Structure formats: C-alpha cells, structure tokens
Amino acid sequence: MGSRLHVQQIKKGPPLPYKDDIRAFTREYAASLDAQDALHKFREEFIIPSAKDLKRKTLDPSQGKPSDDSSDPQCIYLCGNSLGLQPRNVRKYIDYYLRTWAIKGVTGHFTHHEDELLPPFVDVDSAGAKLMAPVVGALQSEVAVMGSLTTNLHLLMASFYRPTQERYKIIIEGKAFPSDHYAVESQIRHHNLETKDAMVLIEPENADQPILTTEHILWVIDEHASSTALILLSAIQYYTGQYFDIEKITAHAHSKGIVVGWDCAHAAGNVDLQLHDWNVDFAAWCNYKYLNSGPGGMAGIFVHEKHGEVKTTKGDGELQSFRPRLSGWWGGDKATRFLMDNHFVPQPGAAGYQLSNPSVLDMNAVVASLELFNRTSMSEIREKSLKITGYLEHLLLTYPLDGLADKPFSIITPSNPSERGAQLSLRLAPGLLDSVLESLEEHAVVIDERKPDVIRVAPAPLYNTYEEVWQFCQIFLEACGKAVQAQG
C-alpha cells in the first residue's frame, strides 16, 4: 500500500468518571460503581462456579459445598467470550421440556399447556427467532435459531457464494478464526477453484500491531472488487477483540456489487448489532459465548429480508422463485410441511434456510438465556460494557506495579471504545505466559489464552462486576511482577 494514509473516525464512548479520580484504584470505588449499575441484579440469574468447584473431581451434587460455605468464594469468571455461564433458569426450561416429552410423547409437538415456557415442539423455532431478533437488530423473519456456526456458514455460502468466471474470489481476514478459514477454503475447492487464486487474505500492515483499519479493509476490497464474489469477515475479531465497522464496510462492498456476510460469534450478545439497518446480506453466530446457551449450543443465522423473498405468481399462488439454497423439510412452508408431497416451498425469510427439525432440548437452553436479554436491551448492555471494559483498561494501564518501571504487557485491542466489545487482549512479554496463568489459576481467575503470549479478558455485562475487575487487576499485576522476577 506504500504510504497510503489511514484515517479512522474516533467516536466517543460514555464518560468515564474514574479517569481522573485517584479513588479508582480502591476496592471501595469499584463497589460504588456496582451500586450504581442498573444491570447488577442480573448477576443473581447466573450460576457462578466457586474456587472449590473449579478443582472438584466429582459431579455428584451431594458432594457439593453447603450453601452457606463462606470459605469457598465465587471464582472471578472473565471468560464469557469463550463460554458464557449457566443461567439459573435453564434447569426450569429443560425440566419443563422433559416433562412435556414424558407425559405427551409425540403429541407434545402440537399440545399446548397452560404453564408452558415454550410453545409445542413444532413451533419452538419461531419462539427462538422472536427472542433472538432484538439481540442482533433484525426482523423476526430475518432470524433463525438453528444448527451450529460453521455448519450455518456453509449453508449460507452455498446460497450466497455463486462464483462466475469474472467474479470468484472470497475476501477474508488472514487471522480469521480457523474454522471460518477452513469453511471458505473448502467452499472454494467445492467449486473446483484453487485457494491461491480465489482466497484473498486481509493482513495487518504491522504484525506487531495486528489491527485492521477500516481504510485498509476498504483498500483491499477496491484492489479485488472486479473479481470478488463474496466477503466474509468477523464482526469482532476473536484474537484482538477488534470490532469492525460493519455498516461502512458493508455499504462499500455493496457499492462494488459484492455480497457481504459476517461471522458474529463474538458480537452477538456483546455489542448493539443492527444487522437489518446496516443492510447486511447474511450473518451467522454461535450462542454459547455471550449468549450463554451452553457448550456447542444451537446457533443462529440472519438473512436480510431482501434475500428471503419467496415469489409466487399472482392469482394462482404458483411458486415462481426464491434464492437458491440447500433445502430441508423444516425450511418448508408450515402449512404444507406435513403433506409429504416432495414439493419444496420455502418459508419466507431466514426460516426457509432451516433443514432438519431443531433440537428442542437445545432450544430450551438458548431461550432460557435469551429471555434474560429480553428483560433489558442491547443498548443498555453495550453501555455497561463500554464502562466496565474502560475501567479494566484504565486500571491495567495506570495502576502502579511495584518494582517495575514498565508494564510487562501491552493491550492489542483498539483503545477506541467504539472499536471493541467487552474483550481486552493482553500480550505478555515473551516467556511470562505460563507463570501468569499459574498464578491466575491459584486465585480462581478464569480467562483464556492464545499461545504464545496473549490472554483474553472479557467482563460480561450481565454477570461481571466492577469489583471483580478490580480484583482481577490486583491478581494479574502481582502475577506479572512475580513472573518477571522469576525470569531474573
């Protein structure tokens, strides 16, 4: 790119009162922020492992701790970007599902109950879509809760990646999550193309600063616009925590006639997405991170309403056209689904991309969490996220570290609050990672690492507290000092 300049618009986040307040370094100040937090009540809706739980070798509930065991404090769980905590109401939802299956058998597909938490089995997908839509800024018809993330990306690319002799390339980040990379690579090969010709990787200009500026992304799009069929990017980059400018990138790609899809795995339930208004073509995400649906929980898709039309001939209602896709019977018209006539008429919208009937067990876990999200709003969640992540950043950068002139780590996540979600990625000096992780584990702090030297710390707004952030910083900074001393 030579000397091309990159100018990025800086947007201000909410005011951060602790910036110039020496009291911000105290536990009491962190507790005062929690006292003012409108979302603090949601913490009680989640089961937070204790320090002893993390080391427990058995699963028998009778071997658990007494409820009043004050010697066994809750762990500091800052790993919602990898796996969200279990909502307390999951057990009730699943118990009701098991009860329905037990007393109704197959008739549970169609039988309503006065105290049901979800509708009969045949309609649970619609209930899931209704609750999911406001979380990602979509119409209910544009969302389906289905499948798993990579499976859904394949299904969507089967519909939206339509390579021609002139346009055949897919643009993706060079450090995309490996599964996304594999999916794109295999889609290209599925069309008998070579990845060296058809896969364009967006790489950072500086490997030591792995951020992709919006201007750099747009430049790559311009360089390959005439030969590109599809762009697939992460809404939030899993490694750096960078939140891309979805609206601007999508609009620019559309101006070049390119379809754009987004992997929202680290964005759904984290930032205030507006997929419909931003005119996104399609998106997919998992629900087990910030959306707390459990390991491998059922995922979600978005298909913009303009791509979900099912056109019929006026008058006789004869099917005329719909966007090509891999089809299955659960995507078929509900009114005719059970006629078994082998004539596929898709439901309009994202529901028409469904294949098999959904796992009702999994759907209950998803809905149990979505019900909590629907008690508040993503704008409120995002507001707290900006504040609590800003507090984490402030303490990490300004809290004194005894005996060290320089901090033995750097934050590789963008400093602009509008360009990140709830995650800060900390790159440690070489050789410190294992020692720091050992210290964090000793203090029942749960984060995740990306070798050789990065840890990812993610305060989830619904269940993490400012006081936990303060505690983490004490433990982490002490661990850094200890690791540096051990190096000699």
Image: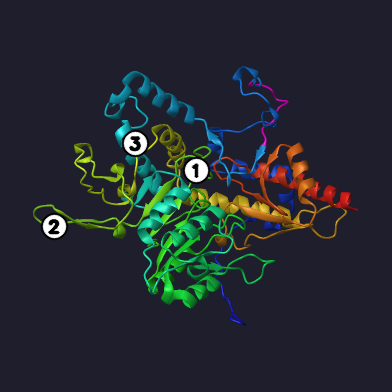
Give the numbered dot on residue 313. 2
> x, y percentage for residue 332?
26, 45
- In the rendered image, residue 479 lying in the magenta stretch gets the answer no
- Please tell me whether mark 2 or mark 3 is closer to you in this view: 2
Q: Is residue 365 left or right of residue 424?
A: left
Residue at screen point 43% across, 74% down? 227
The residue sitting at the top extreme is 62
- Check disc 3 and report its element: helix, strand or loop: helix
Residue at screen point 58% across, 51% down? 422
Given the image, on which type of amino acid does mark 1 rest?
A: Leu
> x, y percentage for residue 107?
28, 24
Residue at screen point 68% across, 32% down? 54
> x, y percentage for residue 139?
33, 51
- Please tell me whether mark 3 or mark 1 is closer to you in this view: 3
- Please tell me whether mark 2 or mark 1 is closer to you in this view: 2
The residue sitting at the front extreme is 192
Q: CA distance from mark 2 to mark 3?
A: 31 Å
Q: Main secondary structure of the magenta part?
A: loop
Q: Is residue 242 left or right of residue 125?
A: right
- The relative height of residue 203 versus residue 52 in the rendered view (above or below) is below
Q: Nearer the viewer, residue 57 or 266?
A: 57
Q: Nearer the viewer, residue 462 or 258?
A: 258
Q: CA distance from mark 3 to mark 1?
A: 18 Å
Give the numbered dot on residue 382. none
- In the rendered image, residue 69 lying in the magenta stretch gets the answer yes
